[in-house]
Image (cartoon, rainbow, N blue to C red):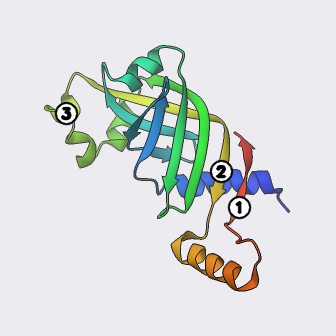
């Protein structure tokens, strides 16, 4: 049987694939970004433009914080890790989408398109049962005076 931390790490990667938006905190300022989680490589990819705060952070110390709050993915996390610029045209082609294209005047061929790789180091993770489970647990807690079970929670090291 796997231990709780390994289960929670696996749950994080399984659910991260469903994330639509996260907050990437760079030098105390959080900005919304569209993540592309890659469970096999244990990387969360971002497409950005040259000159953005995210790109500059990736060229600098690369230490950033990723804040996940997604009820649909049933995942909440405070993740610390490193952000680097990635020179990987094949991966960029694989990830390219109409969402990414909307930000660049010349689409995929825009000279400012940059690919970033976020590699998690450690995190505090909450994996819930979703909105219906949350409402059930709140109702049950109010009837029984027991604390609600909000799912799995713990600290993980990647």
Q: Earlier in the sequence, mark 1 or mark 3?
A: 3
Q: In which quarter of the image is the C terminus?
A: top right
| Label of residue 104 in the image | 3
Residue at 54% across, 78% down: 132
Q: In this view, does 107 lie above or below 59?
A: below
What x and y, as percent, mark residue 115? 38, 29
Q: Where is residue 14 in the image (x, y as percent from the top left)?
A: 58, 57
Look at 49% across and 62% down and name the residue there. 71
Q: Are marks 2 and 1 in contact (CB under 8 Å)?
A: yes
**Residue at image point 36% right, 42% down:** 94
Whichever of labels 2 and 1 marks the residue nearer the N terminus, that label is: 2
Q: Are marks 2 and 3 in contact (CB under 8 Å)?
A: no
Residue 25, compared with residue 142, is above or below; it is above
**Dividing the image into 4 quarters, which one contains the N terminus?**
bottom right
Estimate the spatial distance between the alpha carbons at disc 2 and disc 1, rounded to whole Å. 8 Å
Q: Earlier in the sequence, mark 2 or mark 3?
A: 3
SS at mark 1 in the image: strand
Q: Which mark is residue 138?
A: none
State the SS at label 2: strand
Residue in the image at 19% along x and 33% along y = 104
Q: Position of residue 77 (x, y in %)?
A: 59, 48
Which circle marks residue 125 in the picture?
Answer: 2
Q: Is mark 3 on a helix, strand or loop?
A: loop
Quote the CA–CA distance across marks 2 and 3. Answer: 33 Å
Q: Name the residue under label 1.
A: 152
Q: How crowded is mark 1: few (under 14 residues within 10 Å), some or many (20 or more)?
A: some
> How busy is the neighbourhood of tag 2: few (under 14 within 10 Å), some, or many (20 plus)?
many
Can you tell which of label 1 and label 3 is closer to the viewer? 1
């Amino acid at each position: 049987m796997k231990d709780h931390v390994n289960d929670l790490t696996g749950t994080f990667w399984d659910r991260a694939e469903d994330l639509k938006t996260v907050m990437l905190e760079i030098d105390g300022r959080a900005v919304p970004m569209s993540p592309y989680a890659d469970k096999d490589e244990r990387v969360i990819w971002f497409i950005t433009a040259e000159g953005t705060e995210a790109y500059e952070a990736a060229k600098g110390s690369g230490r950033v914080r990723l804040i996940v709050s997604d009820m649909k993915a049933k995942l909440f996390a405070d993740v610390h890790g490193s952000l680097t610029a990635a020179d990987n045209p094949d991966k960029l082609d694989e990830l390219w989408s109409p969402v990414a294209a909307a930000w660049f005047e010349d689409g995929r061929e825009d000279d400012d398109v940059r690919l970033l790789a976020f590699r998690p180091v450690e995190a505090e993770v909450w994996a819930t049962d979703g909105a219906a489970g949350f409402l059930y647990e709140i109702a049950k807690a109010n009837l029984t005076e027991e604390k609600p079970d909000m799912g799995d929670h713990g600290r993980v090291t990647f």
